[in-house]
Amino acid sequence: MALQQKLTDLVEEGDLSSVLAMCEADELEIAATLSDTRPQYLTMLLCLYVQDDAINARYLWKRIPEAQKQGKLAASWEVGKAMWKNDYLSFYSTLRSIKYAPFHAKITAILEKESLKRAIDLVSRGYSHISCEALGEYLGMSAEDAAEYVKQFGWELEGSHVHPKPLPSDASKSNYLPHLQQLTQFATYVETQ
């Protein structure tokens, strides 16, 4: 099965971690064989954005040859810069303005959905009340659409302000737990030595 077909199947399954791993392996293989084939830089960049990994996206951007930093790849880097600066308006507007091929469009749809989830979580934890206009900026929507969208979470609308309610947290999705477990194992090992 060709690499692109495997990547397409993984995107359909929503397994972007495997997509990223396959692209990185492909990049290393291409570099080792000095092949003329171009690595899947755009796919890698978008997958890093979905994982909210702006730091590794910056490192990827730095290692991409200058000759390839054009077109959709350069436009997608603008999305990453907006993400890095927490500039939600630019993030959503730039992301939506780029016309991707169907394969990458699926990844950007996942990116937009995940970004929306992160913004909702951020607002629910960080605000007791927020203007509809500011909420719309966080969500990449108009103030009216944002106010309507958050009703599904039980948030109360009072005039031109929304009163967010904390969302139920899912401890199994916490990113720090594997790191904490690894740190604990290391500390235990050091103490036994």
Image (cartoon, helix red, strand yellow):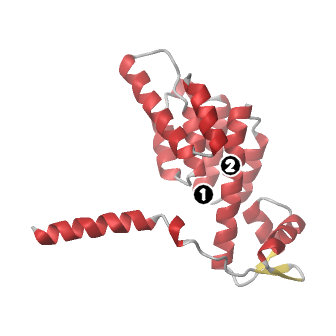
Q: Earlier in the sequence, mark 1 or mark 2?
A: 1
The one of 12 and 81 positioned closer to us in this rendering: 12
Between the C-alphas of marks 1 and 2, the distance is 20 Å
Tell me: residue 20, above or below residue 38.
Answer: below
Snapshot quadrant of residue 177: bottom left
Residue 2 spot, x, y in % from top left: 56, 22
Q: Quadrant of the C terminus?
A: bottom left
Residue at 56% x, 41% y: name it. Answer: 45
Q: Is residue 55 left or right of residue 12?
A: left
Residue 112 spot, x, y in % from top left: 71, 52
Q: Amino acid at mark 2?
A: Ile
Tell me, yes or no, whether the two marked residues, 1 and 2, touch with CB atoms within 8 Å: no
Q: Which residue is mark 2?
A: 110
Mark carried by residue 85? 1
The one of 2 and 47 positioned closer to us in this rendering: 2
| Mark 2, secondary structure of its residue | helix
Q: Quadrant of the N terminus?
A: top right
Residue 13 spot, x, y in % from top left: 63, 43
Q: Amino acid at mark 1?
A: Lys
Tell me: residue 99, above or below residue 162.
Answer: above
Tell me: residue 161, above or below residue 73.
Answer: below
Residue at 79% x, 79% y: name it. Answer: 155
Q: Is residue 186 left or right of residue 161?
A: left
Residue at 56% x, 52% y: name it. Answer: 51
Residue 121 spot, x, y in % from top left: 65, 70
